[in-house]
Image: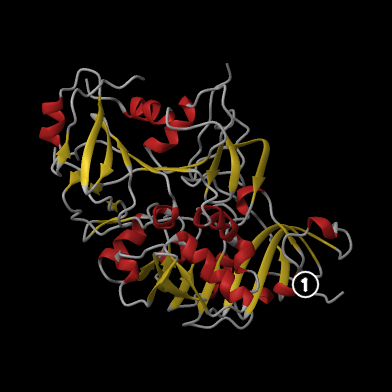
Amino acid sequence: MINKTVTNVREACEGIKDGMTFMLGGFGLSGIPENCIAELVRRGVRGVTCISNNAGVDDFGLGLLLQKKQIKKMISSYVGENAEFERQMLSGELEVELIPQGTLAQRCQAAQSGIPAFFTPAGYGTEVGEGKESREFNGKMHLMEYAFKADFGFVKAWKGDTAGNLIFKGTARNFNPNMAGAATITVAEVEELVPAGELDPNHIHIPGIFVQRIFKGERYEKRIEQRTVRTRK
Amino acid sequence: MALTKEQIAQRIAKEVKDGYYVNLGIGIPTLVANFVREDIEVEFQSENGILGMGPFPYDGEEDPDLINAGKQTITALPGASFFDSALSFSMIRGQHVDLTILGAMEVAQNGDIANWKIPGKMVKGMGGAMDLVASAENIIVAMMHTNRAGESKLLKQCSLPLTGVNCVKKIVTNLAVLKIENNKFVLLERAPGVSVEEIMEATDGDLVVYGDIPEMQL
């Protein structure tokens, strides 16, 4: 088996430069590549574009990069949880492209699949559609959307093996499988890394061909954004 | 009496039919799950990647890897499934989801909806709302009839940036149940004790009232 393992997050992030475009998996704070984000903060990489459904909260997730003003542009679908984000956006310090969530997922998927563009009805007739090519299919208007282009993709999985095969858990799966293989280099961080052959091939969500580097994350905080519970009767 | 948010959810729950796959938006729509009849089978989809969403977990059983689209901790019911975001929106765009319930800042009488941005003031983003409204056949809007300033949210034309065009068919507010037909709001039901006049007063768009309007049954 081709070995995709790197020793740690530092090695996993080799080659990262200012001005690059990154894809980062996660929905809210669930399934985010915590260790890679910490490394991006540590490296102080600047002027980057981040493709991520959300922008973290003020003091966790991508909010950590925002705090340090390392992000030039965000491409997201929902950013309502982050006050610093909103401040930087409204003041014009941060360039923001808000796009529909399904379009975001499909633009990742298209990049992964080698599909340069596709049509979707989402956003037609709204400001999302301004300046975009539109076309009617089956009596309904659609917008043409392009596959993303990114230098690095950072995904987080539950389990992985040395061949780069990945298994996700619960709703921490979200954008991670769609971003794997969608950037020039895909870095996967996992909670548990096992030798190739230990994972049941039937259970693998993303085959290792989509992953260039894999490592076991040193630490996972896995912060809960909205703790909601019910009381026992 | 105008309805509470819980009562709006309770009224909408009556629109949920046996065998439906339902996507609930953030806010009042989330509450709908609490009021669905127990003798029917319904599966709730959350666009972050779960079908068969269950209630909130018991204290101490929260799982950071198990949340809904509002980022709240949830549970998965027996028979639930998890999937990635692209597949989730295949369910939505592919019209496999039967009913979409979402909130709005404004609805226009032609079915346009605005719910993601107030220029210069608030930009939260559209999340999955644009995909949902562009594709769903069956969309119910849950919202208050007027905003905090007392201005109507049911308008001739939306003033805020749109989320989708010509897509809303039904609206349940704290005052009324309405449908959209031929570019007008049609009054179907009124909240208990709320008069047709009060609803007309609170509706900026063209409102059609056919005959006697029944009170909502909750």
User: Could you tell me which residue is drawn at 75 percent across and 74 percent down?
Assistant: A209
Figure label count = 1
Q: Residue at x 36, y 20 (%)?
A: B218
Residue B182 on image: x %, y %: 23, 47
Is B33 placed above or below B48 here?
above
Q: Tell me the colour scheme of the image.
A: secondary structure
Give percent across and percent down for residue A48: 46, 77
Left or right: A51 in relation to A195: left
Of the residues shown, which amino acid type is indicated by label 1?
A: Thr
Q: In the image, A190: left or right of B56? A: right
Q: Position of residue B68 (x, y in %)?
A: 52, 44
Residue identifier under label 1: A5
The image shows residue A208 at horizontal and vertical percentages of 76, 70
**Residue at disc 1, secondary structure:** loop
Closer to the camera in the image, B32 or B14:
B14
Q: Chain of mark 1?
A: A
Decide which of B62, A171 is in the foreground and name it.
A171
- Tell me if residue A49 comes above or below residue B83 in the rendering: below
User: Within the image, what quadrant is residue B29 found in?
Assistant: top left
| Residue that appears at 25% across and 21% down | B214
Report if residue B37 is visible in the image: yes
Q: Is residue A79 above or below residue A213?
A: above
Q: Is residue A53 visible?
A: no
- The part of the image, by quadrant, that contains residue B126 is bottom left
User: How would you rate the neighbour count of disc 1 (Cα within 10 Å): few for under 14, some for 14-19, many for 20 or more?
Assistant: many
Which of the pair A163/B161 is nearer the observer?
B161
